[in-house]
Amino acid sequence: MGDGRSDFFDEGALVSVMTTEPLGRALDYKAPEGGCFVGAFVEVPLGPRRVLGVVWGAGEGGYDLAKVRPVTRVLDAAPMGEAMRTFLQRAADYTLTPMPAMLRLASRAPGLADPPGPRKVYRKGWAEPDRMTEARERVIAVLDEYGGAAFTLSELAALAEVTTSVIKTMVKIGAVSEEEAPRDLPYPPLDPGLEGKPLAPDQAAAAEQLRAVVAGGRYGTTLLKGVTGSGKTEVYLEAVAECLQQGRQALVLLPEIALTSEFLNRVEERFGAKPGEWHSGVTQTERRRLWRMAGEGRVGLVVGARSALFLPFRDLGLIVVDEEHDTSYKQEDGVLYNARDMAVLRASMTDAQVVLASATPCLESWVNAASGKYARIDLTSRFGVAELPEMRAIDMRAERLEQNRWISPTLAAAVTDRIGRGEQALLFLNRRGYAPVTICRACGHQIGCDHCDARMVEHRFLKRLVCHQCGETKPMPEACPHCKAEGRLAPVGPGVERLAEEVAARFPDARLAILSSDLFGSARALKEMIGKIAEGGADIIIGTQIVAKGHNFPLLTLVGVIDADLGLQGSDLRAAERTFQLVRQVSGRAGRGDRPGVALIQSYQPEHPVIRAILSGEEEAFWRAEAAERQAAGMPPFGRLAGIILSSPDVQTVFDFGTDLARRDGPLRRIGAQVFGPAPAPVARVRGRHRVRLLVKAEKAAPLQAALADWVGQMKIPANLRLAIDIDPQSFY
């Protein structure tokens, strides 16, 4: 290597470069003029193209070195540290993901190869256009939606779906301003010395405990369990303050983009400046800046979605996973990983602390805390004057409901009472759209998707049928596609849109807001609506599970759960746990201000153990019973599962391959694992591909990944067949 530094390669030395191309291994190149460090981001020739890669170590050699091509150039970016390279390797081994796919996750910043000089950016201008066209309207709408953010010319044109000449004309008339801007500025420093909010005694004690472990500078994980509204955020922001005081970087993961604006305001209040943001609602320009500043250590705190875990932090000292039980932390396509588990892995590589915060932790975290693997801190009182809501069941067997009505008389009376007092009521139903099934009254045909084995859901606001599996849509037909009878199609069961119709009819003077992910074109539009509701801009809110995620509505004093039994059906391993978490979380939205709240839960089986646990608040008893049941069955977290998902346009190919795979289970039997299947997936066809699942069950300590690799490695995969391995599957659709 030349100069005594084992991490530096002189010009011409043989280096191994891991690229983001799907080759599965590193390739040898010669170090460029001026040499390069291990971890350097480089551009290398691959066939006729130039691709992105990272210098992974010394080259292997052992062949004609005259054929080795040199690295084209070293990019102007902080090299990837050893801890990050080890993390990616360990994550790849755990999830059985090829290394290039992991590297793609860690280099998802646009324009990495661009030079660091200034460039032109575009913002909203000072003048109104003299003549408004449809194209100009779209440009202004995008600029308004992103609230003052800067765009590159090509990015603004793509988002507004206009040509660049439209924007340049708008610059000339002052409707858009063009500025020279440095490419990537450091983020304003956060001040950990500013005074935080006054904390109650149990919150202050919890904050002190977290500060102490962060100051210790060693790896550890703490479960911060607090009832909804107990000030978990205030407590873990003190851990962030300690991390910043130590000169290290912190990352807070949130499950929902819509939560970020309220959270950013709280960070700004506490530290005097906004942190870096990383999620799909952030402009490409900002993504590039944040990626670079994370690597250079010039952003102290990043708030983001699960993929922020793969940013190249220079010195990461704390990771907070807020609402750690949330299913959105599991990536279900591409690289299949669970951000909660990967956060723990990443922290262990960098001597960082992890805080898992939730009112209703997942069973895995509860068991880890019970066994002493994680520390546990409990917050039992609500922040400030707020009190926990009173929880009651409405026994639907005793209620008189008209046909096609879903709000019981008892719940309707409670809603009327709250509106009369100038307070808000939330009606929760975990079903998007108007009705889950559309049936023909003449022949009984249910309208399904042409490409999936799923029923299409009527979305009346869109005047279309939508498949929630593949996104396929078609206009609502006048006649039954099967028997051609006209006017006989009828909706069956409620969705939030149908519930909204009932609310409008029952409470004609009430202001209504619907919170459902498919009704908002962008994250910012959703954030705006949440802001309006929090300020009192609605009397009745109807929402799907998006409302369960940490929003704070001070005037909300009544939560009505329309169909609490919905999640208890089916054979999902986590059905009881998810229903318990969701209903407790939604109920926790009530009474967060200075007015006491009530949660009313409509159920046809109020004696069900899950419903009883929700009402009684005896959470520990619920978790203990759930843990005992899983342990007896050898199921996670006491055993291990892996899902194998096969798909192909040809149903015979996929079943033959699955059957053959199940037969050759020797490598799995050697570690005491069992194979179940092949069986059609619950949704057996998605986007025209037939899907088959196998499930592998093993003991907790079994070397599952190696056995799976040997097992699948015996088979040659047909050209049109896709095979995905899901370690620790969360959903079984």
Image (cartoon, rainbow, N blue to C red):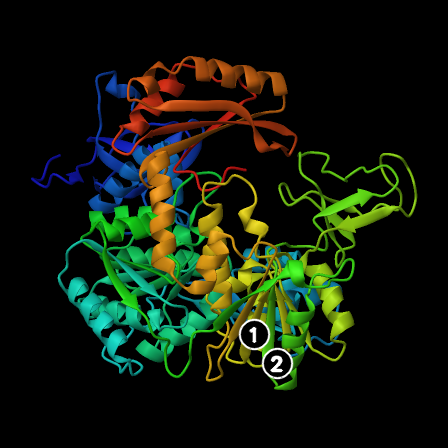
- Kindly indicate whether the residue at mark 1 contacts the one at mark 2 (C-beta within 8 angstroms): yes
> Along the horizontal axis of the image, is 388 left or right of 151?
left
The outermost residue toward the left is: 4
Q: Going by the picture, which residue comes out furthest to the bottom? A: 421
- Give the residue type at disc 1: Leu
Q: Residues within 10 Å of mark 1 (few under 14, many from 20)?
A: many
Crowding near the residue tagged with mark 2, few <14, some 14–19, many ≥20 C-alpha atoms within 10 Å: some
**Residue 619 percent location from the top left of the image:** 38, 59
- Residue drawn at (68%, 72%), measured in percent from left and top? 412
Report the side of 591 relative to 212 (left or right).
Answer: right
Taking 625 as reference, is 574 left or right? right
Circle 1 sits on which residue? 558
Using the rendered view, name the quadrant where residue 698 is placed.
Answer: top left
Residue 165 visible in image: no
Residue at the spot of label 2: 418
- Vertical comparison of 383 with 13: above or below: below
Q: Position of residue 355 (x, y in %)?
A: 28, 59
Q: Position of residue 326 (x, y in %)?
A: 44, 54
